[in-house]
Amino acid sequence: DIQLTQSPSFLSASVGDRVTITCRASQGISSYLAWYQQQPGKAPKLLIYTASTLQSGVPSRFSGSGSGTEFTLTISSLQPEDFATYYCQQVDSYPLTFGGGTKVEIK
Amino acid sequence: QVQLVESGGGVVQPGGSLTLSCAASGFTFSGYGMHWVRQAPDKGLEWVAFIRYDASNKYYGDSVKGRFTVSRDNAKNTVYLQMNNLGTADTAVYSCAKDKGSSTGSFDYWGQGTLVTVSS
């Protein structure tokens, strides 16, 4: 199975900060990676698919990059509604797997 | 608008069984793959199962393989998850999620989930 390691697992940031989250795969997955945002008590929301494609309706401050084994999710200017937990997910092969999550909290 | 509504959760004893349902609306259900994902209390996301739009392919997570069975009824716009031989590690909120396509693996809509508690 493909393992995904996210870092950091927790980060504290301020409104307006640029934030970067990294996801590393245990083997190459081309661009078959998605990113989700989960706010407390809510269902996850798809942000990015195929590593860098913005899901419809997602603000342009979110961007994704990478291929192979290393990927990043960047929030260019953190907004109050962005404080949440973020998960990467590989969609290269079954079983699908998620990273452990990155919780973004207000500094 | 797309809606996914899960039902069937509850409290079950270890070794017991439960069947979850997910009723879908707002899209052409028969054209999309469907997934089940679970989240244990205060834990991360774990993918559980997938069924292709025509049920021709089904896949399972390692921790549930051989115990859980996914199925669908396209006439009723419903996907099911039959869970057998449940253990305490299966305690979680179970959510169904719509695949972006027939089998892309990305989930563009999620239900709110149904809680399954395995306890004696």
Image (spheres, coloured by chain):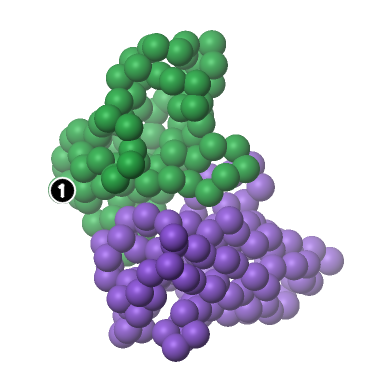
Chain colours: A green, B purple
Kindly identify the residue that appears in the image at 59 percent across and 67 percent down.
B6
Residue A49 visible (yes or no) = yes
Kindly identify the residue that appears in the image at 32 percent across and 56 percent down.
B106
Residue A92's x, y, as percent?
A: 24, 56
Q: How crowded is mark 1: few (under 14 residues within 10 Å), some or many (20 or more)?
A: some
Image quadrant in which the N terminus of chain A is located: bottom left
Residue situated in front as seen by the camera: B12 or B85: B12
**How many numbered markers are drawn?**
1
Kindly identify the residue that appears in the image at 40 percent across and 64 percent down.
B98
Residue B64's x, y, as percent?
A: 52, 69
Residue B112's x, y, as percent?
A: 58, 56
Q: Quadrant of residue A7?
A: top left
User: Horizontally, is A7 left or right of B19 in the view?
Assistant: left
Kindly identify the residue that appears in the image at 37 percent across and 56 percent down.
B107
User: Horizontally, is B25 left or right of B21 in the view?
Assistant: left
Image quadrant in which the C terminus of chain A is located: top right
The residue pinned by badge 1 equals A30
